[in-house]
Image: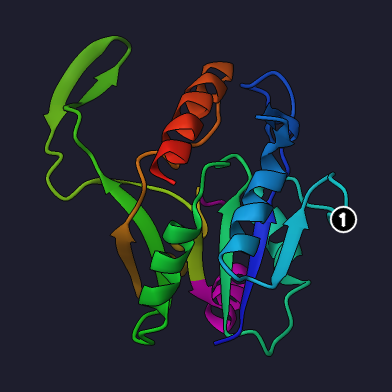
Amino acid sequence: MTTWTIVVAGGSGTRFGGPKHRQMLDGVELWQRSVDAFDAAGIEHIVVVGDVPGGIPGGSRRRDSVACGLGAVPDIADWVLIHDAARPLVTPQLIERVLARASMGDVDGVIPAVPVTDTLKRVQDEAVLATVDRNGLSTVQTPQAFRVPVLRAAHDSDITDATDDAGLVERADGTVVAVMGDPMNIKITNPGDLEIARVYLEVLRGHG
């Protein structure tokens, strides 16, 4: 199957204090680390959305930036992988796991997910309202893979926002399944996350 990748490297990084995708991790900017991982996984066609070398302009929301990236993906593409540059520790192994499930051909989308292990509480104005049953709950990561026509249709038919593209496909009644994610595939949101990523990077090198 013909596969393209869109690496979303936009956003102002308000919570971080500046553009996260331009931060350095072991001498390499975060967005470039993501591109390198997809290249190592054998993905030849990579579109970077954001103010980076070789990137294309994005939109005001994440979903708008993904739509900009989709505009650069040809109709002959079968599948597209959507990945956030703020997850710089994505591995070729995780990319290949997502694509292996997609290649089975029976679904519209594949997402990596990690089961929740912490106790969950519903809290409002400091008051603990309830303990939430964590059975069946997972945290979701990128890269997420979708059939190109399905993702295009989901974006065209739904202008409301979504925290990930799987949410758009789900609302369009597409079939989405999950594969095991990677606990080290963390999202860089706050400056402290970058320090955690440095530690994880050393662990990954040890495994290599």
Circle 1 sits in a helix, a strand or a loop, which is it? loop
Q: Residue at x 69, y 73 (%)?
A: 44
Q: Indicate whether 120 appears above or below 208.
A: above
Q: Residue at x 70, y 87 (%)?
A: 75
Q: Residues within 10 Å of mark 1 (few under 14, many from 20)?
A: few
The residues colored magenta run 146-162
For badge 1, the amino acid type reads: Gly
Rendered image coloring scheme:
rainbow
Residue 96 quadrant: bottom left
Most extreme residue toward the top is: 126
Q: Is residue 66 magenta?
A: no
143 and 125: which is toward the camera? 143
Q: Indicate whether 104 appears above or below 59.
A: below
Q: Is residue 148 left or right of residue 203?
A: right
Q: Is residue 151 magenta?
A: yes
Q: Is residue 118 left or right of residue 157?
A: left
Q: Is residue 192 left or right of residue 138?
A: right
On the question of residue 137 being in view, the answer is yes
On the question of residue 173 being in view, the answer is no
Residue 65: x percent and y percent? 71, 54
Q: How many marks?
A: 1
Q: Indicate whether 172 appears above or below 87.
A: below
Residue 20: x percent and y percent? 68, 31
Q: Indicate whether 90 appears above or below 107.
A: above
Question: Quarter holding the N terminus?
Answer: bottom right
Q: Residue at x 11, y 38 (%)?
A: 133
Residue corresponding to mark 1: 54
